[in-house]
């Protein structure tokens, strides 16, 4: 069913057609093939950053659980957007990820989260930024998306798709999402990291005696605080049996960030992207990003990757995008260390080898790439018994922020029927 590929093997099969975009009703369960088996695929990430060998088991385990939650939804007939939300809730609930529970603390010792979700079928988007007091920010983002799909509010008002701070919190509670005291969202890991980073900052401020020395030490301190170990935003992308795609991302933001700071996880086209195939796009695509939010916002990386993999060779297109539009982006010319990572999938319908065969099978190509030291991913189809997990690392001798790694695979979902 699934086959890992490298740079030499990632090529577009010649027997592909775009996924149908009509509204005709399916003759069977949306996520089932003609053989009655569930169809769908999920790819998740636990962040692009640094994943120590000592915690590798925990990171892989949470990715595996997130995949399983999404597949459970797909098997129950849920669409991609519901499945991707379920995966994100699992990732947010883990104390080992920087999202939801256990998120990084800001300068004031508080947790403020960002999250967004996009539905490739409707192209609707929902996001929250600098949100405190809600255990699962992705649930608020998803609810914003759902409410927007209902149309205009009273007096012709346009429903919001992106809310921040207290406004986002009150909107969430008003719409039935239970609050959670911020102190209960902090874990021993996040509190320990906050105390350690605070001591570093206090020490740096004491020894700074002149402007040049101050500037140099602050830059050094920022590199330590915002190193790749603290960039573990989480995300997921899903395709369901109808060929609909969805993407989501959630983050607690950089360690010791300024209160009110909003990263890429909440920005349109930066944190995630999902778009079903249509006339000009032969593939359905979904993307979720991780890394330094400021770098990802300034390059609109999620959207850029989605556009790129419409090319014939998805692997080569993603490689060039990460190199030319991220690492070497003119918008980041002043940066000597560009940190980020992406997971990407594209899918389309396969044509049977015989003229009378139905167009049933979905061909899914999935990729991940990162400039950070490592990135933890997991993936699973609805036909698999268990999820596969992997910690991708830069090649030996490669410099984080200046080099990149890229891997991926191909899977076929369902089978053409004679």
Image (cartoon, rainbow, N blue to C red):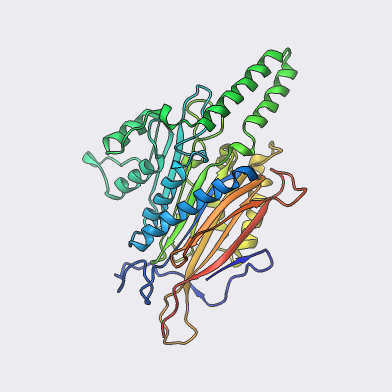
Q: Is residue 360 above or below residue 42?
A: below
Nearer-the-camera pick, 156 or 261: 261
Is residue 300 among what the camera can see? Answer: no
How far across and down, in percent of the image, does residue 399 sit? 74, 44
How far across and down, in percent of the image, does residue 74 sit? 38, 61
Nearer-the-camera pick, 249 or 39: 39
Please name the residue shown 45% across and 77% down the image: 415
Quarter of the image where one finds residue 216: top right
Q: Is residue 100 above or below residue 88?
A: above
Nearer-the-camera pick, 312 or 241: 241
Please name the residue shown 65% across and 22% down the image: 200
In this view, the residue farthest toward the right is: 397
Is residue 67 among what the camera can see? Answer: yes
How far across and down, in percent of the image, does residue 378 sit? 53, 55
Q: Is residue 211 above or below residue 185?
A: above
Please name the residue shown 69% across and 39% down the image: 337
Q: Is residue 265 above or below residue 74?
A: above
How far across and down, in percent of the image, does residue 78 sit? 34, 59
Label tally: 0
In this view, the residue farthest toward the left is: 154
Q: Quadrant of the C terminus?
A: bottom left
């Amino acid at each position: 069913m699934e086959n890992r590929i490298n740079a030499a093997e990632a090529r577009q099969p010649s027997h592909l057609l775009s996924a149908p975009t009509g509204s005709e009703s399916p003759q069977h369960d949306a996520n089932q093939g003609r053989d009655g088996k569930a169809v769908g695929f999920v790819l998740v990430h636990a962040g692009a950053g640094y994943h120590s060998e000592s915690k590798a088991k925990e990171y892989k385990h949470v990715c595996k659980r997130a995949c399983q939650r999404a597949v459970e939804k797909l098997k129950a007939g849920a669409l991609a957007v519901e499945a991707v939300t379920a995966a994100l809730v699992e990732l947010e609930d883990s104390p080992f990820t920087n999202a939801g529970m256990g998120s990084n603390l800001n300068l004031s010792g508080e947790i403020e989260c960002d999250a967004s979700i996009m539905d490739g079928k409707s192209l609707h988007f929902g996001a929250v930024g600098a949100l405190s007091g809600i255990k699962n920010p992705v649930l608020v983002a998803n609810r914003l998306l759902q409410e927007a799909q209902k149309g205009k509010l009273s007096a012709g008002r346009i429903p919001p798709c992106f809310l921040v701070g207290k406004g986002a919190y009150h909107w969430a509670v008003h719409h039935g999402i239970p609050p959670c005291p911020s102190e209960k969202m902090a874990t021993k890991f996040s509190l320990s990291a906050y105390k350690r980073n605070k001591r570093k900052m206090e020490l740096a401020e004491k020894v700074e005696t002149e402007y040049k020395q101050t500037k140099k030490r602050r830059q050094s301190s920022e590199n330590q605080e915002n190193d790749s170990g603290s960039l573990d935003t989480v995300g997921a992308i899903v395709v369901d049996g109808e060929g609909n795609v969805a993407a989501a991302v959630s983050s607690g933001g950089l360690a010791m960030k300024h209160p009110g700071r909003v990263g890429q996880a909440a920005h349109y086209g930066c944190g995630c992207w999902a778009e079903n195939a249509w006339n000009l796009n032969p593939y359905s695509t979904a993307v979720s990003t991780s890394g330094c939010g400021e770098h990802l916002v300034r390059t609109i990386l999620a959207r850029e990757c989605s556009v790129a993999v419409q090319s014939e060779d998805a692997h080569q297109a993603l490689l060039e995008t990460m190199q030319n539009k991220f690492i070497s982006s003119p918008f980041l010319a002043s940066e000597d260390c560009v940190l980020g990572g992406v997971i990407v999938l594209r899918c389309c319908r396969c044509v049977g080898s015989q003229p009378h065969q139905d167009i049933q099978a979905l061909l899914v190509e999935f990729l991940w790439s990162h400039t950070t030291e490592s990135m933890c991913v997991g993936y699973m189809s609805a036909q698999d018994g268990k999820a596969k997990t992997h910690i991708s690392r830069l090649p030996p001798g490669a410099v984080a922020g200046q080099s990149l790694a890229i891997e991926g695979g191909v899977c076929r979902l369902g089978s053409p029927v004679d």
